Image (spheres, helix red, strand yellow):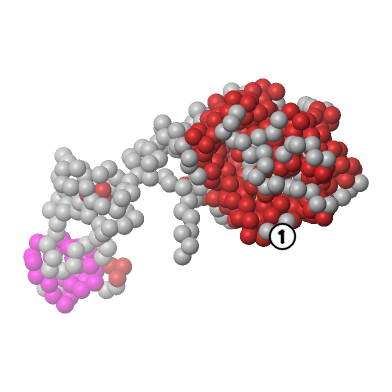
Amino acid sequence: MVADPRRNAGGAGASAGASGTATEDRKPLSDEAHSAFTPPLGVPLPPPPDEDHPTSEFAIPEGVLPESLQEGPEGSAFLPPGGTTAPQGHQPAPFTPPHGIPPVRLTKDVPWQDRMRTMLRMPLADRPVPERPEKHEDDPGPAVPRVLDLTLRIGELLLAGGEGAEDVEAAMFGVAHAYGLDRCEPTVTFTLLSVTYQPSLVDDPVTASRTVRRRGTDYTRLSAVYRLVDDITSSDDTEVSLEEAYRRLAEIRRNRHPYPGWALTVAGGALAGAASTLVGGGVVVFLAAAIGAMLGDRLAWLCSGRGLPEFYQFVAAAMPPAAMGVALTLAHAGVPASAVITGGLFALIPGRALVAGVQDGLTGYYITASARLLEVGYLVVGIVVGVLMVLYGGVQLDAKLNPDAGLGYDSRPLLQILAAMVLALAFAVLLQQEKQTVLAVTLNGGVAWIVYGALADTAGISPVAATAVAAGLVGLFGQLLSRYRYASALPYVTAAIGPLLPGSATYFGLLGFAQGNLDAGFASLTKAAALALAIAIGVNLGGEIARLFMKVPGAGIVDTSDRRAAKRTRGF
């Protein structure tokens, strides 16, 4: 008897399992005639599952090792950082922990400069996101245009005050990060600030920029901006709103300078007189250098009021001290004219601009560094023009200018230490520093001169090496003091390097040119340039050494030993 095909189509599996035979009549009529889970003909059915030990569909099949125990090639993306497989019995944990990757948090125990500088040097994908509080459904989030505008205004005040490019970027990034803009990239050049924010990879970026047209030296204002940035980036309990930040920024802009104009003029004279004492001058030389510097300061103010560029202001300011020295020589007063002129040059040498330019170059901001150094070059040329005009006139009048007169570094160490401290004090007043920082920078300047004198005069070390060591200590102490007070390092460093500035070498180089001795002039100017670079590199190196003692952001919560700064090019 022949079986009904339709019955065999539904029970083919059971019949095949029972009889173990197959015929042409048992073939199904179509693909839909049998279940997809039915084994092919001739294949035995699998054993029924054990109901006492059910398995999950996420269980690892037999014979397959877990991913964390699999060996991969060196540099595999599926291995923990290091790229190597641990020995047997010490297998590493999976790359993603079972409870997720813990978030990287920024500890508030270190200054914001170090925290933001570390984040700036991280790749964008590795930066920790802002720690935002719980938001309500009606909260629209941060006002991006206002946050960017506030960021640019703060960066403008810092850059106009002489701050380095990396610290300006760190401040801008810190402000934007504190207000919730995590995908933010600030850019700083010598005269242009810009910041870009992109909410996500699929959103359009928002870019804003601001131009720095006016620069002024007011470290009181700079310190106030630092306190504002510190409050914005480090506030835990009391959040600084955008309105409060704008109000405080407006107050900072409206604040008057702490010292009047006549005090600045007197400070310039005291600086020149103290500098002349460092190179062997007496009471008469002190008074002559002070009078010449004050006349130059008033003449420079007059040029500034008439709208002349800064180059011509330096030309005008350099002429009275040089004229005072030439006049004393022609009058046969018996005083060293070189000490008078050197004291006047100390008040004009752009030491901070030079240090900032070299610092920007060392940290990789080459465009800003080139612009700063070019500015220093123009200002130095202005000083050269002003002094050479007077010295050339003195040589034509047969003024006996002796390059070796008035140099007595090791004859009066106590008086010179006191003069160095007075110089640093006067320099701090010229920089409009806060009164509570004047004493610290004065002591720092005295320490710098003691170290320089001990190395150069007593130990007989090269003046360039002694200057570099003394400037390094100035930078180290300045950075430590600034971190103790959570403030900028400029008020503790700039005035303290005043006694180390190459005033005498600059003067002797100019005198050599005026007398037609080009070899001696080039040698002295080369020495002056070497001393200036030694000061700049020493200050920067001292600051970097100070940062070695600081904690790494997030080190107390997450292991950041493998989280290095962004790699820089090595020239190839």
Measured as percent of width and height from the top left, residue 116 is found at 55, 40
* In the displayed structure image, the side of residue 43 where residue 182 appears, left or right: right
Residue at x 21% of width, y 45% of height: 91
The image quadrant that residue 36 belongs to is bottom left
Measured as percent of width and height from the top left, residue 242 is found at 71, 33
Along the line of sight, the residue nearer the viewer: 501 or 274: 274
Q: Secondary structure at mark 1?
A: loop
In this view, the residue farthest toward the bottom is: 24
- Please give the residue where the numbered disc 1 appears in the rendered image: 516
Along the line of sight, the residue nearer the viewer: 226 or 25: 226
- Give the residue type that dot 1 points to: Gly
Residue at x 80% of width, y 52% of height: 398
Which region shows up in magenta?
3-28
* In the displayed structure image, the side of residue 490 where residue 293 appears, left or right: right
The image quadrant that residue 487 belongs to is top right
Magenta: predominant secondary structure element? Answer: helix
Instruction: Locate the N terminus and report the quarter of the image it occupies.
Output: bottom left
Q: Is residue 20 magenta?
A: yes
Measured as percent of width and height from the top left, residue 417 is found at 60, 28
Residue at x 9% of width, y 61% of height: 18
In this view, the residue farthest toward the right is: 306
Along the line of sight, the residue nearer the viewer: 271 or 341: 341
| Rendered position, 433 above or below 500 | above
Measured as percent of width and height from the top left, residue 337 is found at 74, 41
